[in-house]
Amino acid sequence: MNIIRIKSTASTNLFLKERLKEHALAEGTVVWADAQTAGRGQSGTSWEAEPGKNITCSLLLYPSFLPPGRHFLLSETIALGIKDLVDDFIEGASIKWPNDIYYEDRKLAGILIENELSGGTFSQSVAGIGLNVNQEVFSSCAPNPVSLKQVTCRSFDREQLMDSLLRKISCRYGQLKAGEYERISQAYQASLYRKDGFHCYEDLNGRFHARLQGVGEDGTLHLATAQGEDRRYAFKEVSFINPSS
């Protein structure tokens, strides 16, 4: 993979997309910034990362081989690659729908995937990744961040970690390219946060308890309430309520 290292940028996703306007880039190109001044999460949320302590990067992919309606497979693939890395160092990591990486009830990593369509196919995807590595103090209003160092009580070499991260994602992406969709989806479902038991959620009508049934091919979250009602949600239509709330 071609890694473009930069000291600082507003957003690695924006930086990579601006480069693409200037000239073509090979699949697997990565922009890695030591500092992001305006890092973004899903739906415009901000991402806090202390300069020089974490991994904030964006990966360029050309998943034009994905069939229509199966774009969520790419989200599953990237999330699994990151979780594969985290699993090398800690137990108990999970994927919080749609693609956050959690340790217990705290957020270790986030992903922002921005796609471009051409003729109904995914011509280009930029996957922004934020992984909390050596940061020990989080000052933003984010409710539940945690880093690998906080969990393991050890510091990490970010260069080595980045190399391993890209290899893990590349391995999962290879499975995707090979058409191993069921393998990826099964691994994703098995890794889901709160996959067992009833938990508290909230939608426009208020809070309720439900059991996680899984995630559909289109990325919708399937829940079954304690009363046996089947509910399906697109992203941002339902919230996970923290047990301490």
Image (cartoon, helix red, strand yellow):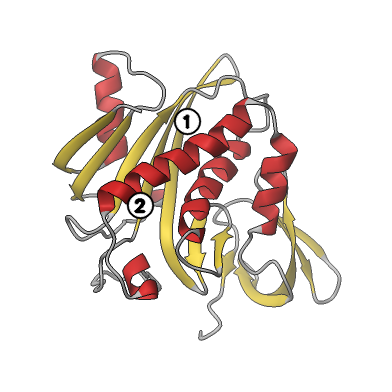
Query: Dot 1 corresponds to which residue?
Result: 115
Rendering coords of residue 140 (x, y %)? 26, 69
Q: Residue at x 27, y 35 (%)?
A: 31
Q: Residue at x 69, y 66 (%)?
A: 195
User: Dot 2 lies on which element?
Assistant: strand
Tell whether 195 sits left or right of 28.
right
Which residue is more in the foreground, 21 or 7?
Answer: 7
Residue 123 lies, with reference to residue 235, above or below; the image says above
Which residue is more in the foreground, 94 or 170?
Answer: 170
Residue 187 lies, with reference to residue 203, above or below; the image says above
Q: Sequence order check: which comes first, mark 2 or mark 1?
A: 1
- Measure the alpha-carbon separation of dots 2 and 1: 18 Å
User: Dot 1 lies on which element?
Assistant: strand
Circle 2: is it few (<14), some (14-19), or many (20+) Cα within 10 Å?
many
| Residue 46: mark in rendering | none
Q: Residue at x 38, y 52 (%)?
A: 41
Residue 3 lies, with reference to residue 109, above or below; the image says above
Circle 1: is it few (<14), some (14-19), or many (20+) Cα within 10 Å?
some
Comparing labels 2 and 1, the label whose residue is closer to the camera:
2
Rendering coords of residue 224 (x, y %)? 79, 66
Q: Residue at x 67, y 76 (%)?
A: 199
Whether residue 80 is visible, yes or no, is yes
| Contact, mark 2 vs mark 1 (Cβ under 8 Å) | no
Quadrant containing the N terminus is: top left
Q: Which of the 4 quarters of the picture holds residue 148?
A: bottom left
Tell whether 65 sits left or right of 160.
right
Instruction: Tell me the kind of residue under disc 2.
Output: Gly
Query: Dot 2 corresponds to which residue?
Result: 130
Rendering coords of residue 176 (x, y %)? 62, 32
Instruction: Tell me the kind of residue under disc 1.
Output: Asn
Whether residue 40 is visible, yes or no, is no
Tell whether 23 sits left or right of 165.
left
